[in-house]
Image (cartoon, helix red, strand yellow):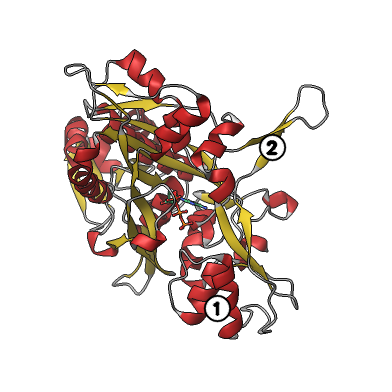
Amino acid sequence: MSHVKNIQDSLKPIVALCKRRGFIYPGSEIYGGFANTYSFGPYGAELKKNIKDLWWKTFVQERRDMVGLDGPILLHPKAWQASGHLEGFNDALIDCKVCKGRFRCDHLIEEALKEDADGLTVQQMTEKVQKNKVKCPKCGAQDFTEARHFNLMFHTHMSKTGADGDVAYLRPETAQAIFLDYKNIVDTMRVKIPFGAAQIGKAFRNEITPGNFVFRVIEFEQMEIEYFIRESAWEETFERWLRSMHDWCKLIGLNPARVHEKEHPKEQLSHYSKRTVDLVYDFPFGRSELYGLAYRTDFDLKRHAEFSGTNLEYTDPETREKFVPHVIEPTFGVERTILALLCDAYDEEQLENGETRTVLHFSPRIAPVKVAVFPLMKKEPLADKATQIFTQLKAFWACEYDESGAIGKRYRRQDELGTPYCITVDFDTLENDTVTLRDRDSMKQERVPVKELLLILSEKLK
Ligand code: ATP
């Protein structure tokens, strides 16, 4: 099926777990699938929400220099002219004349020749493919078309009459919505430079060769910050944000040894950027971009001022000096965060009894379920007591109640969901009001009094 075709073997156990346990389903599956779209199932939706909530708390709620925004997906079409996306948001596309396979030309070159093709013109790419006799990865032929530009923005139509109206674009990044509201924020929020605006939302890109599960999809979510500064402060601000991005990776529980920095060479920078550093992660299919940090200069605000005719200068409240702010942009993809977390947390452990247990070692901060409560058997008064405990705990944490099947199987199921703690109500509970508390990672069980559960769990889940 289209979904499976693009997924490398190294990811397959994770993809299977995501389907089996309700994290991520292939999109439109009952219709045979709709390539490179995915649905976040019940646990995937919880995981996603935990990541977004933690991001918002970290970068908006806990900071005095940040505000939030929720801008529209559809912006005035002129905004995409100003931002340079209409002209420049292209990938180079190349087709195999024999099998009709379609490829991103930079990826084709990188894979065949093991060299970086970022920043080459379409002419240079065509020459490289021809000179080096690059073969089609699908059919092995050496017969490609010339490379050509392909704009990644999705089009739609604004129509009042039922006929095709004016073209509008689904945003390919959330950033531009922040630039369009920069003036509103300054006028209404009493913010002073330096300050940032943060947004979480969908972005759409008509990627030529998507794949690797949710690593590259056509519809995804971004968590982006535009941080407005004076030009003179750009270097120190850039370094500070780089550190904050590493801190975020640690906060969500990613192994720091798998997170690296990749500096973009000057000649490969995007049209708006003077410096870009990617945080790359060691995915099972190779080291690839997780997040990006770019110094966008005053490019965007200046262009929007020019194209809209609106003055976007900032006035320093003390000196009355006027200037167009410069911008540092940290950007975080939600789907790539989820994929990195899944890859990092996934483990198949050999147990002493010869069995293999599959477990997700999620940080409790982001785990979709924090505590599962089981009665040892599905009968009274065990079930009633377990329900009481569940009812008490679910007011504080995402909890699950499960009474069916062997207790070992119930533990395994929670291990696969990454649930840090399980509580079992057994016959001793009825005698002395204690339960067993099982730790996902060590699988150790301790006996704790029911009346201390809230305190103990608060400490453990802090
Ligand atoms: P790539 O080089 O992998 O295409 P990019 O450099 O174009 O990525 P940016 O424009 O910097 O990506 O987008 C910001 C962030 O949005 C990325 O760091 C990534 O986390 C996420 N992202 C970008 N494109 C996709 C996509 N097609 N699917 C999922 N996430 C994406």
Q: Is residue 100 visible?
A: yes
Discs 1, 2 touching: Cβ within 8 Å: no
Q: Which residue is mark 2?
A: 156
Q: Secondary structure at mark 1?
A: helix
User: Gap in Å between the C-alphas at discs 1 and 2?
Assistant: 35 Å
Left-right relation of 61 to 214: left
Left-right relation of 19 to 32: left
Under mark 1, the amino acid is: Lys
Label 2 crowding class (10 Å Cα cut-off): few <14, some 14-19, many 20+?
A: some
Under mark 2, the amino acid is: Thr
Q: Which mark is residue 190?
A: none
Residue 268 in which image quadrant: bottom left
Quadrant position of the C terminus in the picture? top left
Q: Secondary structure at mark 2?
A: strand
Cβ of mark 2 under 8 A from ligand 1: no
Percent position of residue 72, x then y: 53, 28
Q: Which residue is mark 1?
A: 128
Quadrant position of the N terminus in the picture? bottom right
Q: Disc count in the image?
A: 2
Label 1 crowding class (10 Å Cα cut-off): few <14, some 14-19, many 20+?
A: some
Left-right relation of 299 to 442: right
Q: Which is more N-terminal, label 2 or label 1?
A: 1
Q: Quick one: 456 or 447, which is closer to the camera?
A: 456
Q: Residue at x 55, y 38 (%)?
A: 80
Residue 36 in which image quadrant: bottom right
| 33 w.r.t. 133: above or below | above
Q: Residue at x 20, y 39 (%)?
A: 232
Percent position of residue 141, x then y: 69, 84
Tell us which disc is closer to us: 1 or 2: 1
Percent position of residue 37, x then y: 61, 50
Q: Residue at x 52, y 56 (%)?
A: 216
Percent position of residue 400, x then y: 40, 38
